[in-house]
């Protein structure tokens, strides 16, 4: 009995040790699995929908970065923008927070990207953050959906505005003009009248970025999403590098939108929504953040 008891104890310790090792390694295994879901670091060019083209570019210098560029021809029949609608008043927030894929599925748009900065927001852990999907949220700056302004203009928040004629403007003033059907606000102009904005930034570090850029006629729109905060995959771009990128596109004007963990670009497919970039919310790769509002587009196949 004594021998059998010792064998039993050894087996128990072995099983316990394996279980403990699995418990210790499980977060690393989960993180590795999420990393495996990210788009590969390869260049891609394709037409997504009629009038909408997509390009993915893997950059290696001066650091690793993944850049996603969507080009939209607003003259193409069937293309229409949509900004997340506001909540009916009275309410304690202007919108309901949604993941970008949730916005795309709910409103049946073909393409969607996160848009304005918003509050309130915090991110303490993978399970302790705000907002969750369905929570009240307040976009910062001018926000218009279907001709209804639901968020007031804010100082130092320039705007991206779509007219009823499907023309787009990026304006340094903080309010979209009369007749705007859909509009969102960013936090800084990158390019104005074909010239990069000259500014000195004390803390311009690589970061996930989202930007919108337009041509002089207001008939072409570029949406740019840059992945970041992911070592050995994509560390992001500085604001100075983002300006250079949109200038190389030939932008007449460009606007910086909410980036960081909000950065998410999604399309609709016959199998459902598909995230084109590598968002990182609560430090988990390919986890979408619920955000205050979005910019989406209807398009024909």
Image (cartoon, rainbow, N blue to C red):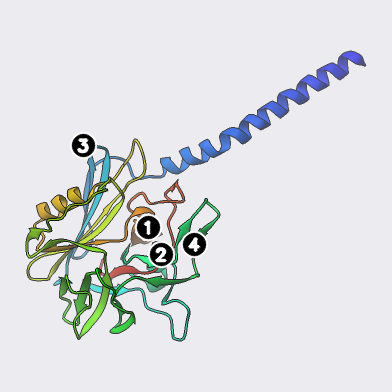
Residue 62 circle label: 3
Residue 59, relative to residue 86: is it above or below?
Answer: above
**Rendered residue at 33%/51% (across/down):** 277
Local packing at callout 4 (Cα closer than 10 Å; few below 14, some 14-19, many 20+) is some
Which label lies toward us, 1 or 4? 4
Q: Which quadrant holds residue 138? A: bottom left
Which quadrant: the C terminus? Answer: bottom left
Q: Is 297 situated above or below 126?
A: below
Q: CA distance from mark 2 to mark 4?
A: 9 Å
- Pick whichever of labels 2 and 4 is earlier in the sequence: 4
Residue denoted by label 4? 130
> CB under 8 Å between callouts 2 and 4?
no
Q: Work out how far the residue at label 1 is from the one at label 4, CA to CA, in angstroms.
A: 12 Å
Q: CA distance from mark 3 to mark 2?
A: 30 Å
- Position of 250 compared to 90: left or right? left
Residue 178 pos. (x, y %): 19, 85
- Do the residues under discs 3 and 2 have CB atoms within 8 angstroms? no
User: Residue 192 at x, y = what percent?
Assistant: 11, 64
Location of mark 1 (residue): 262
Residue for point 32% across, 46% down = 228
Residue position for label 2: 291
> Quick one: label 3 or label 2, which is nearer the N terminus?
3
């Amino acid at each position: 009995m004594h021998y059998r008891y010792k064998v039993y104890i050894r087996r128990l310790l072995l099983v316990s040790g394996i279980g403990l090792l699995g418990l210790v390694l499980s977060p690393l295994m989960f993180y590795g699995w999420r990393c495996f879901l990210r788009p590969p670091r390869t260049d891609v060019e394709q037409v997504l929908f009629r009038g909408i083209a997509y390009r993915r570019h893997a950059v290696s210098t001066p650091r690793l970065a993944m850049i996603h560029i969507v080009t939209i021809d607003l003259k193409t029949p069937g293309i229409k923008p949509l900004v997340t609608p506001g909540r009916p008043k009275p309410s304690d927030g202007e919108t309901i927070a949604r993941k970008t894929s949730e916005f795309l599925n709910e409103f049946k748009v073909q393409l969607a990207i996160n848009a304005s900065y918003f509050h309130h927001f915090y991110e303490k852990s993978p399970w302790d953050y705000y907002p969750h999907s369905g929570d009240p949220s307040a976009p910062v700056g001018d926000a218009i959906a279907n001709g209804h302004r639901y968020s007031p203009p804010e100082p130092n928040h320039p705007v991206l505005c779509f007219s009823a004629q499907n023309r787009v403007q990026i304006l340094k003033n903080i309010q979209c003009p009369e007749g705007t059907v859909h509009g969102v606000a960013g936090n800084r102009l990158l390019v104005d009248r074909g010239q990069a904005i000259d500014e000195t930034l004390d803390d311009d570090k690589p970061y996930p970025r989202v930007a919108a850029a337009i041509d002089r006629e207001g008939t072409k729109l570029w949406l740019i999403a840059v992945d970041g905060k992911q070592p050995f995959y994509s560390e992001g771009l500085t604001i100075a590098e983002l300006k250079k990128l949109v200038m190389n596109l030939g932008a007449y004007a460009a606007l910086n939108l909410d980036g960081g963990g909000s950065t998410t670009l999604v399309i609709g497919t016959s199998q459902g929504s598909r995230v084109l970039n590598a968002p990182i919310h609560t430090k988990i790769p390919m986890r979408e953040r619920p955000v205050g509002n979005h910019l989406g587009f209807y398009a024909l196949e």
